Amino acid sequence: MKNIKKYISALCLATGLLISMNACKIGKDYVQPKLKLPSTFRGDTLDFFGDTSSMGLIHWKTFFHDPTLKMLIDSALANNFEMKTALLNLQISNRVLAQNKSNYLPSVSATLANGSRTWRSKDFGSGPLTKYYDRKGEKAPENMFVYQSQFGSDISFSWEIDIWKKISSKQEQLLAEYLDTQEAKNAIQTNIITSVAKGYFNLLMLDAKIEVAKRNVQLNDSTLRMIKLQYTAGEITALAIQQTESQRLLAASLVPELEKQIVIQENALQTLTGKLPDSIKRGTSYEHLFAESKEISLGSPVEIIRNRPDIRSSEFQLMAANANANIQQAMRYPSFNIGGVLGVNAMLPRNWFNIPGALLGGITGNLTTPIFKNKTLKTQHEVAKLERDKAEIQLQQKVVEAVAEVSNAVVTVDKQREQLELARKRVDNAHLAVKNANLLFKSGYATYLEVITAQSNALDSDLDLVELRQQHLDGFLDLYRSLGGGWR
């Protein structure tokens, strides 16, 4: 017993010394690299953007005003198949992270019962233990085989001391991967919100185009009736009727095409919300669908690092790669394991629980180090460091692309605003031209061709204005997304 106590004391002392070496952690702690960021976004000198609250920090329920659109987004976030998959991936990553924490504890296993029987020749055994051999019969022949039985039950444990912080580095890696999975879910949410909003904007645009087409059909009908009266009076030829009818059919042919596109867009939106194809209710207003005012700003370029899920995800990937490099470096250093077993063991079943005679116990300690493994460990460490460098480059790339994306969105929104003003003036001018052409035609100062041309220009102007409105809505939404909005 004294020798056992001395052995345990020595083992505990060695363990304590090795644990104290944890302060000398190998590898490098993660430090965020210097990122290329401008002081302001290019284009952030526009009068439209104020300096109150950053657009990227606005919650999507506050950003959007249309109740129907909010309902569609809510449904998509709850039922979208891609979102459901992302949530399951998040749960899986969480389970793996929680499991790794248990690696700090020793692993314990219990053998409830075991038995074995080994046959040997009579000449194999010698000495005092031979009397415990069981034999069949008292007078066995010289060449008879004997057997030895063993019966036991025990509890054993094994514990690797985290000398070089392999377990803690693994915990850092898994935590970074879990957070990366979280940001992947956020990125999916942002994309879903953007897709639903753009689909809804497209529906409103198609509705507006149908109204324009139907209004022009009615206008062409009125013009056609007037031309037919003049034809009856012999003032014009049948060619005028034919050309006017062609103009009317052109406007009328837009209606079924637009109705087809509406059904397809409704089906696409229902798919995003995880539902079967069906019609979709519209909101009441085409204008002011979201927070578009001088009370918002672009914010600082530094904020996109905190706001954008793709940049945050890229940085977590860099953290995981850094932790993995530390793990691979630690694999090249010695490892220390302690273990033990406690149980009962006997050759005869009747002696199985003969305490203390049947007691079995032992403590082990192993300090092992790799010497030569065909450069495998060295190569794995070098590859892990290169993977870390690659992840840092990818983070730098994400940041530069994000800054450029915001700048592009700012310029797009501003220039589309100018285009909208010009398009509205063009529409007003085209409608005035139609009115004047009709009056002049009735008075005999204009030909039917001038009337048809004016109506055709008005139709094109109205359709262009509707499309430009949608593009402006999409551009403003892209700016919101590029600043990191939508996932909160």
Image: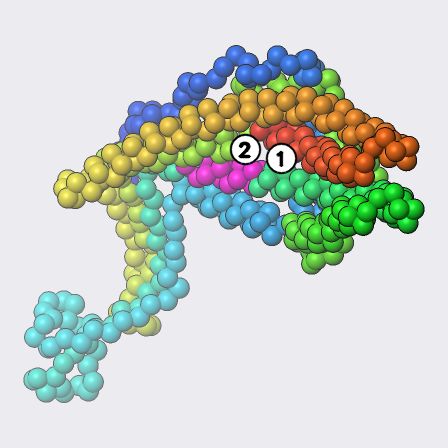
Q: Of residues 421 and 186, which is closer to you in this image?
A: 421
- Residue that badge 2 annotates: 309
- Residue that badge 1 annotates: 487
Give coordinates of residue 96: x percent, y percent. Answer: 46, 46
**Which residue is at a point 73% across and 23% down the rendered structure image?**
421
Whichever of labels 2 and 1 marks the residue nearer the N terminus, that label is 2
Q: Of residues 409 and 146, which is closer to you in this image?
A: 409
Of the residues shown, which amino acid type is indicated by label 2?
Answer: Pro
Tell me the element at label 2: helix
Tell me the quarter of the image containing the N terminus: top left
**Which residue is at a point 33% across and 48% down the rendered structure image?**
158
Disc 2/disc 1 C-alpha distance (Å): 8 Å
- Are discs 2 and 1 less than 8 Å apart at CB? yes
Q: Of residues 20 and 101, which is closer to you in this image?
A: 101
Q: Residues within 10 Å of mark 2 (few under 14, many from 20)?
A: many
Give coordinates of residue 277: x percent, y percent. Answer: 70, 57
Q: Measured along the vertical axis of the image, is residue 296 above or below residue 249?
A: above
